[in-house]
Amino acid sequence: MSPDDTEDLTRKQRREQAREERRALEAAEAARGARRKRLTQLGVVATVVVIAIVAIAVAVGSGGSKAPPKKASHEAESALATVKSTVDGIPQAGNVLGTPTAPVTLQYFGDLECPICKEFTLGALPSIIQKWVRADKLRIEYRSLETATREPEVFKTQQIAALAAGKQNKLWYFVELFYHEQGEEDSGYVTESYLRGLAEQVPGLDLAKWNADRNDAEFATQVAADAQAANNEGFNGTPSFLIGTTGGAMKKLGEVSLTEPTGFDEAIESLLKAS
């Protein structure tokens, strides 16, 4: 082999070596680019996962309670305004709405979570109160009967909360507010926070006294006595009613509309004529 041939071979080898080095550099750069892409993708995925975990935690934290969302202030204000227009200025004593000397008494057995009681409260009751209670012709006794509330202890707690307001002669504010602001049936909305929220809306209620009075054993006895009275009458649904002359015998008030007061009006008129 001549010197020229040797020199050509050397040049070829150098060129080939240079090409191999370039290929190696390109391959290394491509590998680094692929790694950077994978790391970026993994970073994006990790960020999405963290965001999802945080979102789930927030949702669980805020939605774990069965209590309903707090009503907008204008809704609460509207409910209170309606209740005040219904019962303001009418004498109250314990569970009784109306003057003690009214000639006719209506006993109203209810469960504060009962949606049908709410129908009566928003339907026929305001007219009955306006026409008869404000005229000192009728007094209404609110009595407890468990029908819609699923948990006996919750039932007793909520009814006693109303009776404790009655110790300050404000039971009817509490009862009416409860019906106006009822939550969804079987949703477990009746919590301590819910009951206190109602009490806070009752005009002039001494909250510390109300809370202390809820421990009075006489109220649990009263709830049990109401249940026994309802059982004696064969009541198994709410609302149920007894009516009669005050201090006299009471009788069942049967099929009456809960949204129209006509049936109640006729029964009251009949008793007034007979007295």
Image: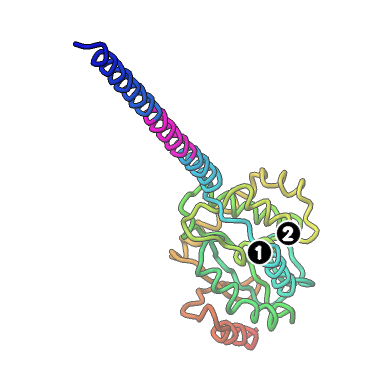
Q: Which residue is mark 2?
A: 201
Mark 2 and mark 1: Cα distance apart in space: 8 Å
Coordinates of residue 5 in the picture (x, y in percent): 23, 16
Give the structural element (helix, strand or loop) at label 1: helix
Question: Is 21 placed above or below 119 here?
Answer: above
Query: Is 35 colored magenta in this rendering?
Result: yes
Badge 1 amino acid: Leu
Mark number for residue 39? Answer: none
Q: Earlier in the sequence, mark 2 or mark 1?
A: 1
Q: Nearer the viewer, residue 195 or 21?
A: 21
Judged left or right of residue 230, residue 220 is right
Residue 8 falls in image quadrant: top left
Q: Which residue is mark 1?
A: 177
Q: Nearer the viewer, residue 142 or 78?
A: 78
The N terminus sits in image quarter: top left
Coordinates of residue 105 in the picture (x, y in percent): 64, 73
Q: Are marks 2 and 1 in contact (CB under 8 Å)?
A: yes
The C terminus sits in image quarter: bottom right
Q: Nearer the viewer, residue 122 or 209?
A: 122
